Amino acid sequence: MFDKGVDLDLRNEPPRPASRQLIEAERMSAIGRMACSISHDMRHFLTAIYANAEFLERDDICACMRADLLLEIQEAVLAMTERIDSLLEFGSNGRKSPLVRARVSSVVEKAVAAMKFHPDGRNVSITVGKFPPTEADIDAKNLESAIYNLLLNACQAATLSTHVPEVMVHLTEVNERIYITISDNGPGIPAAVRRTLFDPFVTAGKLNGTGLGLTLARRIAEEHGGSVCLEESNRDRTVFTLSLTKNNCYH
């Protein structure tokens, strides 16, 4: 017989060393798969950069073609940078910077401004609602990265719309929680991938991308006491919400 004071519920016990080793092994395996994928992409981008650089040396190309070649080089460099950043973020063990009290709207505005310069955001109408001047304990750089990833997905989806591509961004606060809602008028997310949407390397049918954007966005949100969830997705509208808590000093 067990003593009455002994709690037999082991569900809340910390993972045993073997379990932690297994989790770490799975993470390293995932990093290895991603590194192989990225190396393939890098070769593709570098080949394009090299070819365009050779064309730029010619004297018989017009200014318009020269501008197009330079734009393709810039886009290739940007894509390479995004893949490297994703690999570094996924390979890290979580947030390193301390949380600092800051205005969340400023972080959202910076992410939106950066997205408008991205090739996938240049031809998308990004509408921003009126943001409340709410503050929270945040890692501004990581939070901006999470919002940027959600915006990138939304813009890429919106470009597939049969209408004018549109993305809308709203920021609201309810008691101690803050919600950043991003919606697009794209064709929606296939039902077959919705359950695994936040798993690493799930791309929802996109030709380009690492499949880590949503994984990293959710992890960053969780580090801020919140999460990322798919609120709605149909043929006309897809909505994601990133939530966080205002006071995260205990994290």
Image (cartoon, rainbow, N blue to C red):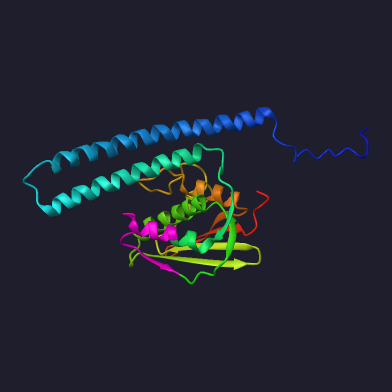
- Residue at 39% x, 41% y is 83
Q: Which residues are magenta?
A: 110-128
User: Residue 21 falls in which quadrant of the image?
Assistant: top right
Residue 204 vs residue 23: left or right? Answer: left
* Front one among 129 and 39: 129
Residue 62 vs residue 1: left or right? Answer: left
* Front one among 52 and 208: 52
- Residue at 36% x, 33% y is 39
List x then y, in percent, for residue 28: 52, 31
List x then y, in percent, for residue 88: 46, 38
Q: Residue furthest bottom?
A: 130
Is 25 magenta? The answer is no
Would you say residue 110 is visible in this rendering?
yes
Residue 63 vs residue 246: left or right? Answer: left
- Residue at 62% x, 62% y is 177
Is 117 magenta? The answer is yes
Q: Vertically, is 32 above or below 164?
A: above
List x then y, in percent, for residue 42: 32, 36
Would you say residue 160 is visible in this rendering?
no
Residue 73 vs residue 215: left or right? Answer: left
Q: Vertically, is 190 above or below 126?
A: above
Q: Which quadrant holds the N terminus?
A: top right
* Front one among 148 and 4: 148
Q: Count up the numbered dots.
A: 0
Q: Vertically, is 176 above or below 51?
A: below
List x then y, in percent, for residue 246: 62, 60
